[in-house]
Image (tube, rainbow, N blue to C red):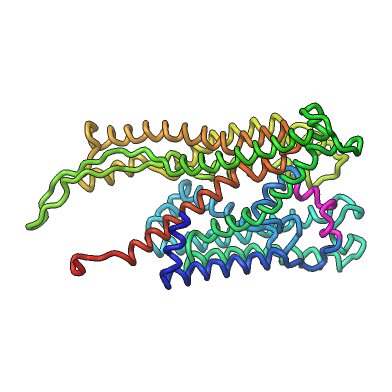
Amino acid sequence: MFQTFKNAWKIPDLRKKMLFTLMIILLYRIGARLFVPFVNVDLIADHQNTQRMTSGVFGMLNLFSGGAFEHASLFALSVSPYITASIVVQLLTIAIPALERLSKQGDEGKKKINQITRIITVVLSLITAFGYVRLLEGSSASDSFLLVQRSDGAMYYFAYATMIAAFCAGASIIMWLAERINDYGIGNGISIILFANIISRGGTMLTELRYLLMNAYYDTSSGVWVTKYGFDKWKTGWSLVGGIAGVVAYVAVFAALIGFIVWFTNSERRIPIQYAKRVVGRKMYGGQNSNLPLKLNMAGVMPIIFASSIVSILPTIAGFLSSTNGFRKFVDNWLNQGTPLYIISYIVLIWLFSYFYIMISFNPVEVSNNIRSQGGSVPGIRPGKPTSDYIKKILNRITTLGALFLILVAGVPMIIGAAVPNLTKLATFGGSSLLILVGVALETAQQLEAQMSMRNYKGFLDN
């Protein structure tokens, strides 16, 4: 993959696209550090005061925003509204016949679908921005990050409207930057920005590793250095040898997980297709063998996004309430991140959404009809319904493997984080974020390889 980027850099056209993409990422990172008006910057700068915006369900949002969420910057909402809008439009395309017909009208239909996605993004940004400002305001004046209070009267409502407009504008700018990458850069714009955000939190992961090592041999309860070897004080502080072993084990598991994700992402089940010979005019076409490749992880990271969005609804609502509220106490005790019920619900939803996403994104009947219309058939299977049933049977098996893979990648780190408190933040970084990083890197490398092959293609006239 690194060789692909190196070779692409030597081609002037591709080098311009890569530099343009890097420039957009730089602009995004600048916007991620621009504060909006009426936010107490000094209070935000103290990380001890921002625990409620980085713990629980908000930890993932902060990770995907590259730290902009906890700093209440212009790009705090990050790509979440656009991703949610894209999911909503995709679901509506299946449910509403008019949108389904629109999606099949080529470039014109795609432009109209994109316009609908933009409108829904703005609407969702307004709703999300309102909830985010409420989170910044807190339940009382003592834990508020705002420079205005309700007692300020008209100024308070003006500040509220200004902050909501600023956060909504930030989400719209991110959408515009992503589209510029699609038009003039390399890769999918939203994926590239999300990739850059997760990478920017790599320093935080290294810091957590250092803290893990420090806590391994410094007993925080007694305030003395632990010299006894072993794991007898793992809750408050491990021994030096135990801590080093824990860090080495985490790095080894991290590297093995990356390799496993790369292998599984590139794996595919190929259904052989045989095309019959046919004569058109004076030429004969067909008579060749091909295959229908089905990725083992066809759903990608979408089931994880769906599942995390559903299970985080109640904890997110509870986060806006006072700590003494009965509903919030119930959610914190039973439905918050790390609780058994939360983890079980998360895993079950990943399983269900894996099948649901395949159902709405892949139509075996349509694929079977396309194969038959092109004069192809699966060896040993009759065209038509038997072919679609055969493809559906293989698809169900693949989806089962893909769902188990996603549960292993996203669910197991969450279980480890709940069982070992020292690894909570490290577990948050793993799993789904690694899946996104690997997926975006492989997809971008494949696009570069495709464009390089187009530019280096030599026809029969050059032979």
Percent from the top left, x then y, of residue 339?
72, 32
Q: Quadrant of the C terminus?
A: bottom left
Percent from the top left, x then y, of residue 418?
72, 33
Residue at image coords 62%, 61%: 122
Task: Pick whichever, 228 or 408, lies toward us.
Answer: 228
Residue 49 lies in magenta, yes or no? yes
Residue at image coords 37%, 33%: 394
Q: Which residues are magenta?
A: 43-54
**Image check: 19 left or right of 63?**
left
* Vertical position of residue 445 compared to residue 293: above or below: below
Residue 447 lies in magenta, yes or no? no
Q: Main secondary structure of the magenta part?
A: helix
Residue at image coords 59%, 44%: 432
* Vertical position of residue 182 compared to residue 246: above or below: below
Percent from the top left, x then y, of residue 68?
71, 58
Task: Pick whichever, 402 or 241, lies toward us.
Answer: 241
Name which quarter of the figure residue 280 lies in: bottom left
Percent from the top left, x then y, of residue 62?
70, 52
**Image check: 388 left or right of 423?**
left
Name which quarter of the figure residue 424 lies in: top right
Residue at image coords 64%, 62%: 171
